[in-house]
Amino acid sequence: MHFEHLVQINDPANPLLQFLSREQLWRGLWQRVENPMIFLPGLESCQILERAGSGWLRQLDFGAARIRDRVTFVEPEWLRFDIEAGAGHPGGSLVIHLEEPEPGALFLRFVYQTTLNLEGAERQYMEYVKSAYRESDLETVRVIRLLLAEGTCQ
C-alpha cells in the first residue's frame, strides 16, 4: 500500500496559527526520533540500539509488540523510518519531507509504504488505515506546536 498526503504548517490566512520556521519544524520532527513516546500512543519505551552518522536503529516497545526501525535523515530535508516486518505487523516505511515551495510556506509530506495489499471488502480497512495515518500526522504537528510553545523543544 502506498499512501501520501500533505500537511500545511504555515497558513497566512489563519492569524491564530503560530508561524513556524524550517528550523523550528525540524527540531520538532527530531523530537519524534529522540522522544517518540510523546508522539506514539501506547509506546512504553524506546531504546536506541545504534547511532551511526545519519542513521539510527531503535527498538520500540509497545508492551505486547516490539518493533525495530531504522531512522535515516538529511537535516533539515527529510526523515525516513524503515520498520522491520515482524509478528503481527507487515513492516514498511514512512518518509517525512519538509517542503518549502516559497520562503515561509512550509508543508510536511508524509509518504507511507507498506506490504499491506487489500482488495474488495477489505478495501474499507485500507481506508481506515489511511485515515489513521492522516490523524496521526496531524497529531504530530499539534504536538510539535505544543512543544515549541512550551519551550521544551530544543
Image (tube, grey):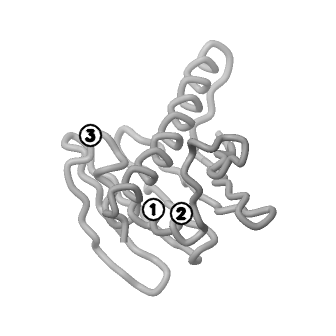
Residue at (48, 62) in percent of width and height: 29
The extreme top residue here reads 121
**Which three-letter amino acid code belongs to the residue tagged 2?**
Leu
Give how far apart the Cα atoms at labels 1 and 3 are.
Answer: 20 Å
Query: Residue 2 versus residue 139: which sits nearer the camera?
Result: 139
Query: Residue 43 versus residue 70: which sits nearer the camera?
Result: 43
Q: Which residue is mark 2?
A: 25
The extreme bottom residue here reads 53
Nearer-N-terminus badge (1/3):
1
Q: Position of residue 81 (x, y in %)?
A: 50, 60
The extreme right residue here reads 102
Residues marked 2 and 3 touching at CB (< 8 Å): no
Q: Which residue is mark 1?
A: 28
Q: Position of residue 132 (x, y in %)?
A: 50, 31
Closer to the camera: disc 1 or disc 3? 1
Residues marked 2 and 1 touching at CB (< 8 Å): yes
Residue at (46, 47) in percent of width and height: 140
Dot 1 crowding, Cα within 10 Å, few <14, some 14–19, many 20+:
many
Q: Is residue 75 above or below residue 17?
A: below
**Which three-letter amino acid code belongs to the residue tagged 3?**
Gly
Residue at (64, 61) in percent of width and height: 97
**Which three-letter amino acid code belongs to the residue tagged 1?**
Gly
Residue at (54, 51) in percent of width and height: 18
The numbered disc on residue 42 is 3
Q: Position of residue 78 (x, y in %)?
A: 60, 67
Q: Position of residue 38 (x, y in %)?
A: 31, 50
Query: Residue 92 versus residue 109: which sits nearer the camera?
Result: 109
Dot 3 crowding, Cα within 10 Å, few <14, some 14–19, many 20+:
few
